[in-house]
Amino acid sequence: MESLYKSEAGKKEILKLYDHKLNELGIAYESKLLDTPYGKTNIIVVGDSTKPPLILVHGSNGCAPIALETYPGLHKQFQVFAIDVLAQPNKSATSRLSMKDNSYGLWINDLINQLELKNVTMAGFSFGGLIILKTLLQNESNIKEVFLSAPAFIVNGNPLIALFKIFIPMKRYMKTHKNRYLEKFLKTLFTDRDEFALKYLSKVFLHFEMDFTPIPVIKGEEASLIKAPITIIAAKKDIMFPGVKMIKRAKKIFPSLKNTVLLEGSKHVQNRKDNSRIEKLILEG
């Protein structure tokens, strides 16, 4: 399998930051590496096995330690399975799945079956939302409830705005290595400044082959088949997946929509205050 890392040195830099973030969390964890038909998948398991299971799915260009840091208290009430998404800068295989079919759903359900999990709560951010919805579409029989924060796959923002505010600064950083372009990118997407994101993405953008495939949106007839309760937390200032537009469409297409929250001051990536609010929603069920 061809690596998505541009060099071994670059891979080492990214995974060094991964390990640093995981150790910085200061929590007991177990790493599991599972074989799947789609590639080896790394999972960080946190919390007591007697507690109900929760699968945590990070967003694009992310990793399990970032997801665990985002909602640090979940392991007090759940056994948390934080998944390193395939083909992202982390410790899972670099095989890229299609967003047009149910490959992501087949992959996650294979993990659920291998781990022998039932009544699973799922929580995901951004691209993690797409993965969770694909899981529900493929087979939701083991899923109890899902929480989606600024999820992909429901609506998309204006592609011209995304081009000028996200992709051009990213490409300029990749070409020039000048931090001002990376700062501009982060300011557009992050509600608050994030020093680790600055360090991590500065390496990812230079040393990892990212996926620029356009994100599809779920069809209304697909959404109508989902029975698992869905909570959607949308961000009003999110230019990738606009919050008001998202909630409006979600209310039309998801018969199992349990709750919606619009974070008034949030951009695509929530700050600590809003993440705490989301964590509380998950813990209260």
Image (spheres, rainbow, N blue to C red):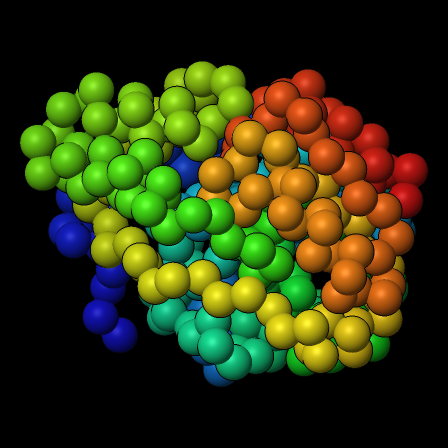
Along the horizontal axis of the image, is 107 left or right of 99? Answer: right
Q: How many marks are shown on the rendered structure?
A: 0
Between 163 and 37, which is closer to the camera in this rendering?
Answer: 163
Residue furthest toward the left? Answer: 176
Between 47 and 247, which is closer to the camera in this rendering?
Answer: 247
The N terminus lies in quadrant: bottom left
Quarter occupied by residue 271: top right
Q: Relative to residue 144, is residue 243 depicted above or below? A: above
Q: Relative to residue 61, is residue 274 depicted above or below? A: above
Q: Residue at x 43, y 47 (%)?
A: 158
Quarter occupied by residue 206: top left
Q: Residue at x 12, y 30 (%)?
A: 177
Q: Residue at x 41, y 38 (%)?
A: 18
Along the horizontal axis of the image, is 266 left or right of 121? Answer: left
The spot of residue 241 in percent (x, y) is 54, 46
Q: Residue at x 83, y 36 (%)?
A: 281
Along the horizontal axis of the image, is 32 left or right of 81? Answer: left
Between 69 and 238, which is closer to the camera in this rendering?
Answer: 238
Q: Relative to residue 203, is residue 181 depicted above or below? A: above
Along the horizontal axis of the image, is 254 left or right of 133? Answer: right
The spot of residue 238 in percent (x, y) is 53, 36
The C terminus lies in quadrant: top right
Residue furthest toward the right? Answer: 284
The spot of residue 273 in percent (x, y) is 68, 19
Q: Is residue 20 visible?
A: no
Q: Is residue 248 visible?
A: yes
The spot of residue 221 in percent (x, y) is 71, 79
Between 120 and 228, which is closer to the camera in this rendering?
Answer: 228
